């Protein structure tokens, strides 16, 4: 037997599960690693987004959350493929990351390198301890 003989059965099973299970399954979600920098002043977020271009990423910040949304452009007619198996998620995905304390939304930095979106999220100065240097009067 070859693959072509199994294709109708595979399509039937896929259609059944898409129809029966689709409402129960949540949409795909971006995975994220979140950690504190060694100095403790910044949260770092790393999200794998292979194949996504910078212009296809939207980032919004509130006082204690960051929302990341990827919206890849659909494949053009020439790029469409007849997949035998597709495990990489396609289409829009998102992630809301909540932080345990307030963040400085004006100074969040985002870079995309080798398919990894890296966010450097400074903690808000409110409530943070600051050392003040005493200067000699002249």
Image (spheres, rainbow, N blue to C red):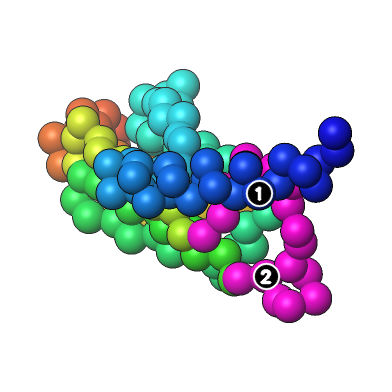
Part of the protein shown in magenta = 74-91
Residue 58: percent from left, percent from top: 44, 64
Report the residue marked by disc 1. 8
Residue 8: percent from left, percent from top: 66, 49
Residue 12: percent from left, percent from top: 54, 47
Secondary element under disc 1, as helix, strand or loop, is helix
User: At 46% across and 21% down in the image, what residue appears?
Assistant: 38
Q: Quadrant of the N terminus?
A: top right
Q: Is residue 87 above or below residue 93?
A: above
When asked about the image quadrant of residue 135, the answer is top left
Magenta-drawn stretch, dominant element (helix, strand or loop): loop
Residue 103: percent from left, percent from top: 26, 45
Question: Mark 2 packing: few (<14 Cα in 10 Å), some, or many (20+)?
Answer: few
Report the residue marked by disc 2. 75
Secondary element under disc 2, as helix, strand or loop, is loop
When asked about the image quadrant of residue 87, the answer is top right
Q: Nearer the viewer, residue 137 or 114?
A: 114
Q: Quadrant of the C terminus?
A: top left
- The question of residue 89 being in magenta is answered with yes
Res. 19 mark: none
| Residue closest to the far left | 127
Mark-to-mark CA distance, 1 and 2: 25 Å
Check if mark 1's residue and mark 2's residue have beta carbons within 8 Å.
Answer: no
Please indicate whether residue 78 sits to the left or right of residue 74 in the image.
right
* In this rendering, the label closer to the viewer, 1 or 2: 1
| Residue closest to the far top | 38
């Amino acid at each position: 037997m070859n693959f072509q003989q199994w294709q109708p059965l595979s399509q039937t099973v896929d259609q059944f599960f898409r129809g029966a299970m689709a409402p129960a399954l949540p949409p795909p979600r971006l995975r994220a690693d979140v950690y504190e920098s060694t100095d403790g002043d910044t949260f770092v977020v790393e999200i794998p987004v292979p194949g996504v271009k910078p212009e296809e990423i939207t980032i919004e910040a509130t006082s204690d959350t960051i929302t990341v949304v990827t919206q890849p452009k659909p494949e053009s007619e020439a790029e469409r493929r007849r997949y035998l198996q597709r495990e990489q998620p396609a289409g829009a995905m998102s992630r809301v990351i909540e932080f345990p304390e307030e963040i400085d939304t004006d100074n969040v930095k985002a870079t995309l390198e080798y398919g990894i979106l890296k966010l450097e999220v400074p903690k808000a100065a409110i409530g943070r301890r600051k050392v003040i240097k005493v200067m000699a009067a002249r």
